[in-house]
Amino acid sequence: MSRRSASSRRWVAGLLVLVLLGGAAWVLTHRTVTTAVTEIQYPLRHEDIIRQQAKAKNLDPALIAAVIFAESHFRSGQTSSAGAEGLMQITPETARDIARRSGGTAFTVEDLATPQINISYGSYLLRELLDRYDGDLAAVLAAYNAGPGNADRWGGSSLNVEDIPFPETRAYVLKVLEAQTQYRERYAKELGISG
């Protein structure tokens, strides 16, 4: 009887080890899969530049990441049909104006392909729009997408997303607001967002 009892205990112990190993493998795999899904749904690149620009311009780093996500999905070689370039889709005309007003160096279109410069200019524009529209994100994002003149006509700092007559701009504002929430929740550590 004791042989059978010892054999049963070894079998149970072996089964317990297998269950624990299987559980550990599932946790590791699940974590890896979750991380991969997050990276596909909401990619993040250039977080060091985003953190630096957020600090320098007193911006939410999740907002910068969300605008990059909506504008280029973090692909730096993007050019829009309107001629906007780079991660934050800045037009050369806007970039020249920002370079002049911010005391930057002589601007060339090639500068917009550089993540540091593109994110710096896009962040400058976000800060300027936040100041113009008293922090109203719907107005800021509508102006970023469709221009300040349109955002002003639609209500400026008292703009409601539902009142935006351009479907593309309305969808853009909602997309960025959702992405901002996702980046804040998923990448708080990487973006330097504290509690």
Image (cartoon, rainbow, N blue to C red):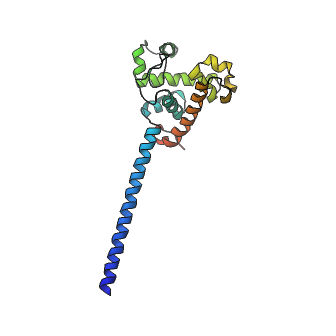
Q: Is residue 132 left or right of residue 33?
A: right
In the displayed structure, 81 sits above or below 43; it is above
Q: Between residue 4 and residue 107, name the one nearer to us.
A: 4
In the displayed structure, 20 sits above or below 179; it is below
Q: Is residue 135 visible?
A: no
> Number of numbered discs present?
0
For image coordinates 63% across by 18% down, the residue present is 150
Q: Is residue 12 visible?
A: yes
Image quadrant holding the C terminus, namely: top right
Q: Position of residue 99 (x, y in %)?
A: 48, 15
Quarter of the image where one finds residue 22: bottom left
Q: Position of residue 40 (x, y in %)?
A: 43, 39
Q: Residue placed farthest to the bottom in the image?
A: 1
Q: Residue placed farthest to the left in the image?
A: 3
Quarter of the image where one finds residue 112: top left
For image coordinates 65% across by 23% down, the residue present is 165
Q: Residue placed farthest to the front in the image?
A: 167
Q: Is residue 182 left or right of residue 134?
A: left
Q: Position of residue 64 (x, y in %)?
A: 51, 30
For image coordinates 36% across by 70% down, the residue present is 15
In the displayed structure, 9 sits above or below 159; it is below
For image coordinates 65% across by 29% down, the residue present is 161
Image quadrant holding the N terminus, namely: bottom left
Q: Position of residue 57 (x, y in %)?
A: 53, 27
Q: Between residue 77 and residue 111, name the one nearer to us.
A: 77
